[in-house]
Amino acid sequence: MKRLIVLAICAVLFSMSAFAGVPGKTEVTLSGALVDVNDGPNIWFATGDCLFPLGNGHVVLGPTITLGSKDVAENAGVALDWNLMGQKSGTFFIGASASYFSQSLEDAEDFAVTARAGFKFNVGKGALLKLYATQIVDGRGADVSDLAVAVGIGAKF
């Protein structure tokens, strides 16, 4: 777990220097989701994203870290969102993330690829509310989880 957090912090610091001077805004969000598992109890997740703009902010890319109600769900990776209408107003977005899990399981993959889509509402000049759905499309959890709905708060700077 400690290695996961240190890795995420290093990725954020490296990314901040790499994307300095880009005209779009960095998006930092904290989201929560409840996943319905077919053959077991539901699992909650808290996900933090720090997404840096590529160009004018239509595409944002950066590190992501997820903590969950089960240790086997903790992971870190990279996320990408495509803001269909840019960052100046509320926008629909589609995105994906690829993550590596901190704990290995015998009969499960050590990665997951997740698709996500939703809406980002601007709140004032520097805040946002993010509502979206996620689906694991490959890797750990792809065969046992259903669509999840997430709600997040964030800042743009």
Image: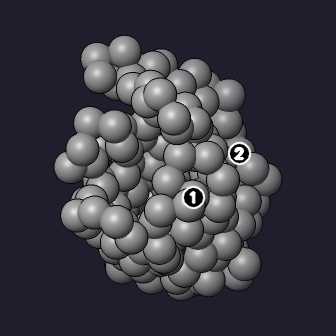
**Could you say which disc has been placed on residue 104 in the image?**
none
Q: Residue at x 71, y 45 (%)?
A: 22
Q: Is residue 77 visible?
A: no
- Is 91 in front, or is 131? 131
Quadrant assignment for the N terminus: top left
Q: Residue at label 2?
A: 22
Seen in the picture, residue 76 relative to 47 is either above or below; the reply is above
Q: Residue at label 1?
A: 142
Residue 143, position as x, y percentages in the image: 56, 61
| Left or right for 45, reference 52 | left
Question: Dot 2: what SS?
Answer: loop
- Amino acid carrying label 2: it is Val
Label 1 with label 2: CB-CB less than 8 Å: no
**How many marks do you count on the picture?**
2
Seen in the picture, residue 54 relative to 90 is either above or below; the reply is above
Q: Is residue 116 visible?
A: yes
Question: Dot 1: what SS?
Answer: loop
Q: Residue at x 24, y 44 (%)?
A: 70
Q: How is the image coloured?
A: one colour
Q: Earlier in the sequence, mark 1 or mark 2?
A: 2
Residue 147, position as x, y percentages in the image: 48, 76
Q: Residues within 10 Å of mark 2 (few under 14, many from 20)?
A: some
Residue 12, position as x, y percentages in the image: 49, 30
- Is 123 in front, or is 10? 10
Q: Residue at x 34, y 37 (%)?
A: 72
Q: Residues within 10 Å of mark 1 (few under 14, many from 20)?
A: some
Seen in the picture, residue 114 relative to 89 is either above or below; the reply is above
| Left or right for 117, reference 130 | right
Q: CA distance from mark 1 to mark 2?
A: 35 Å
Q: Could you say which quadrant of the image residue 60 lies in?
A: bottom right
Residue at far right of view:
55
- Amino acid carrying label 1: it is Ala
